[in-house]
Image (tube, helix red, strand yellow):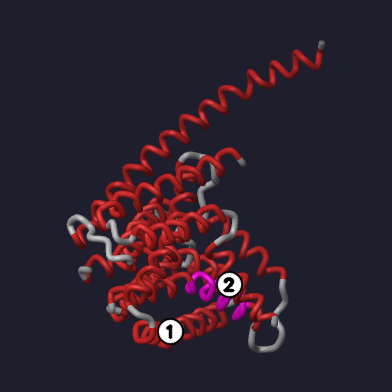
């Protein structure tokens, strides 16, 4: 698998999670102070990096590559399909779009209620740590999955590092949630990539001779993107149909009850 | 115990949550791939088709519940 494709995929996947983590770090920083917020975020990043350093090489050396690809492919396929489902339901109006500004305001008001005890703000540290750690665990899984399956843990880790650095610096420089980042579009793209890689690796692990060999990821991506477009349009049609049907249904029910 | 529960909850939330059909379907895909294994070309068509069917079924379920 080509290194640039691996790098780009991990950067995008990690960026989605980092945007969410940055919202929490910013909310803590603005409402409780930057020091404990950044301390919490850095502590979480150190723990996450340690997890990659410990489990990544261990997986590569201990698990046979074909078995690893099937396991990793299945995990990526599950995550990819879950993200894709959510992104498509959002794109067709069945789910509300994620609003970083609203989440930021909510976190900020919740944190403003608490009181600080002593010189070290444990609450701020813990909230920031938890926010980065939980979002980061998904990134760790993606880094280890991609790194172990391709035997290129360094590039996968580099991709996650670039995403964390760029998104984190951007958030701190702006000091407000990254609401302008088209998160749903990014999530849709990443989910298509994860689903394609997941399918590809399940097949690779089972000895499938993919037409086009590594280029199969590209045509799988194309097929899934086309299917996603058809599904969004079908969902939108269904949504319009339900909306048009509802007033008539209510009218009919009203007539029934008045009889 | 608290940490073990938290760890188990994390994995449940990450891999199952409100879409158990996708988890079960992806596992079924891997199993199907294992049993069909020998017929390699069939799998390169079957795997993406199964994933699309799985996603479509889950979307219908999701849209109906809203």
Q: Residue at x 27, y 68 (%)?
A: A6
Q: Residue at x 56, y 78 (%)?
A: A129
- What whole-number distance in Å separates the C-alpha atoms at marks 2 and 1? 30 Å
- Let me know if residue A214 is in the magenta part: no
Name the image quarter holding the N terminus of chain B.
bottom right
Left or right: B7 in relation to A149: right
- Let me know if residue A132 is in the magenta part: yes
Q: Vertical placement of A237 versus B23: above or below?
A: above
Tell me the residue that label 2 is attached to. Answer: A28
Left or right: A76 in relation to A133: left
**What number is the disc on residue A22?**
none
Chain at tag 2: A
Dominant secondary-structure state across the stretch colored magenta:
helix
- Give the SS element for disc 1: helix
Q: Vertical placement of A5 versus A183: above or below?
A: below
Residue A167 locus on image (x, y percent)? 39, 68
Tell me the residue that label 1 is attached to. Answer: A55
Residue A186, quarter of picture: bottom left
Q: Residues within 10 Å of mark 2 (few under 14, many from 20)?
A: many
Magenta stretch in the rendered image: A124-137
Q: Residues within 10 Å of mark 1 (few under 14, many from 20)?
A: some
């Amino acid at each position: 698998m080509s290194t640039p494709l691996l790098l780009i995929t991990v950067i995008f996947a990690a960026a989605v999670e980092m945007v969410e983590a940055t919202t929490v770090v910013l909310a803590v920083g603005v409402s409780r102070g930057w020091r404990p917020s950044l301390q919490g975020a850095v502590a979480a990043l150190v723990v996450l990096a340690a997890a990659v350093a410990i489990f990544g090489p261990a997986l590569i050396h201990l698990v046979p590559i074909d078995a690893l690809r099937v396991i990793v492919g299945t995990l990526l396929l599950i995550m990819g399909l879950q993200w894709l489902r959510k992104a498509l339901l959002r794109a067709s109006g069945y789910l509300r779009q994620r609003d970083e500004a609203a989440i930021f305001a909510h976190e900020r008001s919740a944190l403003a209620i608490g009181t600080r005890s002593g010189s070290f703000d444990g609450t701020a540290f813990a909230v920031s740590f938890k926010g980065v750690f939980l979002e980061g665990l998904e990134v760790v899984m993606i880094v280890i999955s991609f790194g172990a399956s391709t035997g290129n843990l360094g590039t996968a880790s580099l991709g996650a590092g670039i995403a964390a650095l760029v998104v984190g610096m951007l958030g701190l420089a702006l000091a407000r949630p990254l609401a302008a980042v088209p998160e749903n579009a990014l999530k849709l793209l990443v989910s298509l990539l994860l689903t394609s890689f997941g399918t590809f690796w399940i097949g690779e692990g089972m000895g499938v001779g993919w037409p086009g060999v590594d280029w199969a990821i590209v045509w799988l991506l194309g097929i899934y993107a086309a299917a996603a477009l058809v599904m969004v349009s079908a969902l939108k049609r269904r949504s319009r149909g339900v909306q048009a049907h509802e007033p008539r249904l209510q009218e009919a029910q009203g007539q029934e009850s008045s009889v | 115990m608290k940490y073990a529960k938290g760890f188990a909850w994390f994995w449940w939330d990450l891999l199952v949550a409100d879409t158990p059909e996708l988890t079960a379907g992806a596992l079924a895909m891997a199993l199907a791939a294992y049993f069909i294994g020998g017929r390699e070309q069939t799998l390169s068509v079957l795997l993406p088709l199964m994933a699309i069917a799985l996603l479509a079924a889950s979307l219908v379920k999701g849209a109906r519940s809203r």
